[in-house]
Image: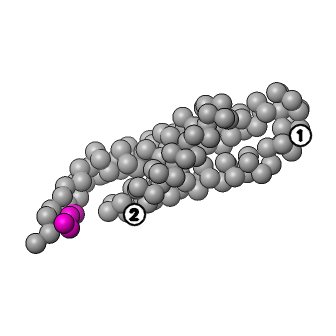
Amino acid sequence: MPEKHLITADSCKRSARLFNYGTIAGALLPIPLGMLWIAGSMFVYAANAHHPDPRVAHYIRWGGYRFYAVAGTVTVFSNDMAAFLGGGAKGWLAVWALAIVLLVPWSLYDIWKAGREDWKDIEVEKHK
């Protein structure tokens, strides 16, 4: 007989917010250090993408869409964007600021929205 395992409402809420917390931290760190969040985000995404509560997966998925879209765009077009925005250090700071402006407000909104959800404890079967 499978064993029952309880996933608390607080755990669900924390899991739903985790990707967005990391995105904010990754965006605020300078570009070389922020790249560490790319590796960490893959782990967080993979660990929570198939969470038993579909709302957790929803928050993780949309946080991933935003982060990976901005990270991919910056990776491909960063040199051109930096040159367009002034070149040199000024251009790179402008690219970084643009990434912050795109990521942080949406992530904060998702954190706020997840905090207002009515999370419930979930009981799942744990197979041996």
- The residue closer to the viewer here, 62 or 87, is 87
Q: CA distance from mark 2 to mark 1?
A: 41 Å
Q: Residue at x 34, y 47 (%)?
A: 13
Q: Residue furthest top?
A: 89
Span of residues in magenta: 124-128
Circles 2 and 1: CB atoms closer than 8 Å: no
Q: Which residue is mark 2?
A: 50
Q: Quadrant of the N terminus?
A: bottom left
Instruction: Please indicate, yes or no, whether residue 105 appears anywhere in the rendered image.
Output: no
Q: Residues within 10 Å of mark 2 (few under 14, many from 20)?
A: some
Q: Quadrant of residue 120?
A: bottom left
* 61 sits left or right of 114 in the view: right
Total numbered labels: 2
Q: Which labelled disc corresponds to residue 84? A: 1
Q: Residue furthest front?
A: 128
Q: Residue at x 71, y 35 (%)?
A: 96
| Residue type highlighted by circle 2 | His
Q: Position of residue 12 (x, y in %)?
A: 32, 51
Question: Is 1 inside the magenta-drawn segment?
Answer: no
Q: Position of residue 102 (x, y in %)?
A: 66, 43
* 21 sits left or right of 88 in the view: left
Q: Position of residue 39 (x, y in %)?
A: 55, 47
Q: Residue at x 62, y 40 (%)?
A: 35
Select label 2 or label 1 by which is in front: 2
Q: Position of residue 37 (x, y in %)?
A: 55, 42
Majority SS type along the magenta span: strand
